[in-house]
Amino acid sequence: MAFTTGGSGAMADINVTPLVDVMLVLLIIFMVTAPIASYPVDISLPQRSTNPPEVKSDPPPPIRLRIDASGTVFWNDSPAPLAELQTRMTSEVQRDPTNQPTLEIDANGDAAYGTLAKVLTAAKNAKMEKIGFVEN
């Protein structure tokens, strides 16, 4: 549409209001119909209890697990292959399942996330209950 402005010629501006209305309607449609990406993660949270937990008089020494930037895993300062971790963790748990050692994981900031994921998977499969992260 061309409008005249007091006799000085036609105004050639585009009316963008209908375009904005259509774009907002499309945006709302895509937001509502797009599937929400959700990935369920199984975790077991502590439950409320009226009985206080038993205090272990002599807890076992913690297991220090360090992952360096190259992805090498160290079990108490000695190198350990990833394939062997679950076996070691299972043997530690089987010594005394009610009084497990704490697994202290120290991952370098430049380490690959996949290595940490494999360590955590091995700990879960070995049924380790006490896992902590150490920051240096």
Image (cartoon, grey):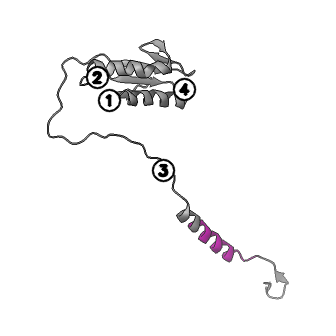
Distance from label 3 to label 2 (Cα)?
Answer: 33 Å
| Residue 5 percent across, percent down from the top left | 79, 85
Please tell me whether residue 20 belongs to the stretch shown in magenta.
Answer: yes
Q: Amino acid at mark 1?
A: Glu
Q: Which residues are magenta?
A: 14-28
Question: Which residue occupies 24% across, 19% down?
Answer: 59
Residue assigned mark 4: 111
Label number found at residue 38 = 3
Report if the CB atoms under discs 1 and 2 are less than 8 Å apart.
Answer: yes
Q: Earlier in the sequence, mark 3 or mark 2?
A: 3
* Front label number (3 vs 4): 3
- Location of the N terminus by quadrant is bottom right
Distance from label 1 to label 4 (Cα)?
Answer: 24 Å
- 53 relative to 41, above or below: above
| Residue 38 percent across, percent down from the top left | 48, 50
Which residue sits furthest bottom? 7
Q: Nearer the viewer, residue 20 or 66?
A: 66
* Front label number (2 vs 4): 2
Mark 2 nearby-residue class (10 Å; few <14, some 14–19, many ≥20): many
Considering the whole magenta stretch, tell me its main secondary structure: helix
Label number found at residue 129 = 1
- 10 relative to 29, above or below: below
Numbered circles on residues, count: 4
